[in-house]
Image (cartoon, helix red, strand yellow):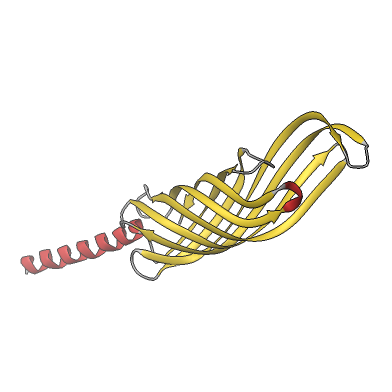
Amino acid sequence: MKKMLYIVAAVLAMFFASAHADAQMGKRYYINGGWQFNGTVGNDFVESAQGYGAYMEGGYFITPMFAVGGFASFNTNNEYIPKSTYTFSDGSALTTDLERSIYQVPFGATMRCRFMRSMFQPYVEAKIGAQFSNQSTYMSTFLNRHDNWGFYVSPEIGMTFFPFANTDFGFQVAAYYSYSTNQNKAVDINGINNLGFKLGIAF
């Protein structure tokens, strides 16, 4: 009888340990969100790296390692242009400083592959979707703004970390590259390239 009780206790212990491990290693779904630091590269309109961004993403693991889901984020990058004199085609001139801004809002679908199910969960992810963007130039009391849409794609590498027992709350860190086909001939933009990293929370 005592031996049977030991066996039952061992089986129950393994069951609860497995349930606890499942909580720590991730449920069938994930939700991530947080702060985003973004740098625009490869254009002459605004080339800056700033932390005016945020993101939200989530997905469902259709296999233990592969998930599909959706995302949305935004970034604003600004660049100050010192005072200078600009001459126009009609012969007039304007002396002023400028503030240039690129605002980006991508959203769409995600595919994520994680490499292990443990406290640390490194992963690679691909995002594909659409991006709304506007490019603005502020000069004195005048604003010149152009809105446009483009196709968006972004590879990402990152890790989620679940340090607390008996909870699905954790943290996320990731780095990404993105490209969109947004165009603005007025300021010579033919596609927008970004590099950045993300710090957030994970569920």
Q: Image height check: is 171 above or below 109?
A: above
Q: Position of residue 130 (x, y in %)?
A: 61, 63
- Tell me what residue is drawn at x 84 percent, y 34 percent: 86
Q: Quadrant of the N terminus?
A: bottom left
In the depicted view, which residue is nearer to us: 195 or 13?
195
- Tell me what residue is drawn at x 87 percent, y 42 percent: 142
In the depicted view, which residue is nearer to us: 38 or 84?
84
Q: Is residue 118 left or right of residue 180?
A: left
Q: Quadrant of residue 61?
A: bottom left
In the depicted view, which residue is nearer to us: 196 or 24?
196
Q: Is residue 138 left or right of residue 36?
A: right
- Tell me what residue is drawn at x 83 percent, y 45 percent: 143
Q: Position of residue 97 (x, y in %)?
A: 80, 32
Q: Position of residue 151 (x, y in %)?
A: 60, 62
Q: How many numbered discs?
A: 0
Q: Quadrant of residue 101?
A: top right
In the depicted view, which residue is nearer to us: 171 or 53?
53
Q: Quadrant of residue 95?
A: top right
Q: Image height check: is 163 above or below 92?
A: below
Q: Position of residue 202 (x, y in %)?
A: 46, 53
Q: Quadrant of the C terminus?
A: bottom left
- Tell me what residue is drawn at x 35 percent, y 53 percent: 121
Q: Is residue 129 left or right of residue 185?
A: left
